[in-house]
Image (cartoon, coloured by chain):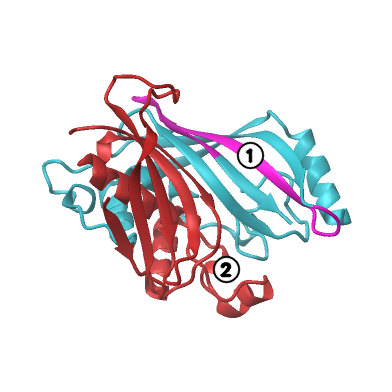
Amino acid sequence: MREVRFTPDQAALDRFGASTRNSHRIHYEADFAREQGLDGTVVMAQLHGCLLFRAAARWAGDPVRVVSLGWHNRAPSGPGAELTVTVSVSEAGAVSEAGAPAGDGLVRLELTETGPDGAVCCLGYAVVRSGR
Amino acid sequence: MRPALREAEARALASLGHTGRRSLGRVRAVDAAAFAEAAGESDPRLTDPAHPGFLLHPMYLVSLLRGPGPAGQEELRPDGMYRDEVPGTDGLDVLLMAGGQRLTWHAPLLPEQELERTHRLDSVHRKGRRPAEFLVLVVHKTWSTPRQGLVVEADETFLVR
């Protein structure tokens, strides 16, 4: 099992938002985010996705080996909170791109992203081409 | 169900299956590298365009909401989201949240190509119980270039409250 850890601060959210042209105010304005029922500004879903992707790519050894990636957002996280992604090989093990067992070198990984209190922020999976 | 949510549902149902297109412009290696840096990436294959194994970060194109150039104020909702990002919600007093994504890559995107995104609303479902009902919308998206064809596709889920 390998972990990916990242603690985005508000500057990181600003940079990430600028690079993706994302202007949704819940990522930048704490007062506005609180008006929306959040505790403050929140990490972008795509940034969570990047951490899940990174975990899968590291497991596979190369970013190009990541064939597919999926996740559900479970709970928001804010700037300053350390995010940790853990990886495990699913019991299904090798899968075809359609999800059926196959001996074509594809492996399904289960991905869990948690915040500093252990709460699950995202649950996901990746299918990677195994270089192992 | 609140009137605004009911209206969003009616609009969404009316737009089921319609495909929209948007140019995201020419994708530059330096922009993808800046994206990777902003995401905290340390792999030089994703952060250093001069690296012999440099690759446009696969998450970059699926995270990119617009092409180059400034967005006009008329393109934005009061909350800063693009008015056309979640089908059927333009101008309505509803809260929007990202629910999740399923992405499949077909080929690594090569730099300096014109990227086009399509989006099509595939499903609309009610969830929850009164008075906390909400809508779950699933939008199918594709990203392609004239030279490479389809490079990635996604099913993106939005929650509308």
What subunit carries mark 2? A
Q: Main secondary structure of the magenta part?
A: strand
Q: Mark on residue B122?
A: none
Query: Crowding at label 2, few (<14), some or many (≥20) Cα neighbours within 10 Å?
Result: many
Q: Residue visible at 17% across and 52% down?
A: B44
Report the quarter where the C terminus of chain A lies: top left
- Circle 2 sits on which residue? A26
Per the rendered image, the range of residues in magenta is B129-155
Q: Give percent across and percent down for residue A42.
A: 52, 68
Q: Give percent across and percent down for residue B56.
A: 28, 43
- Chain assigned red: A
Would you place residue B6 above or below residue A12 in this image? above
What subunit carries mark 1? B
Q: What distance separates the C-alpha of mark 1 from that of mark 2?
A: 22 Å
- Amino acid type indicated by mark 1: Val
- Amino acid type indicated by mark 2: Ile
Q: Nearer the viewer, mark 1 or mark 2?
A: 1
Relative to B93, A73 lies left or right: left
Dot 1 and dot 2 residues touching (CB under 8 Å): no
- Chain assigned cyan: B
Q: Secondary structure at mark 2?
A: helix
Q: Give percent across and percent down for residue B37.
A: 28, 60
Q: Mark on residue B138?
A: 1
Q: Secondary structure at mark 1?
A: strand
Relative to A96, B142 lies left or right: right
Would you place residue A19 above or below residue A38 in this image? above
Q: Residue furthest bottom?
A: A31
Q: Residue visible at 66% across and 53% down?
A: B83
Q: Residue visible at 54% across and 47% down?
A: B100
Q: Give percent across and percent down for residue B131.
A: 85, 59
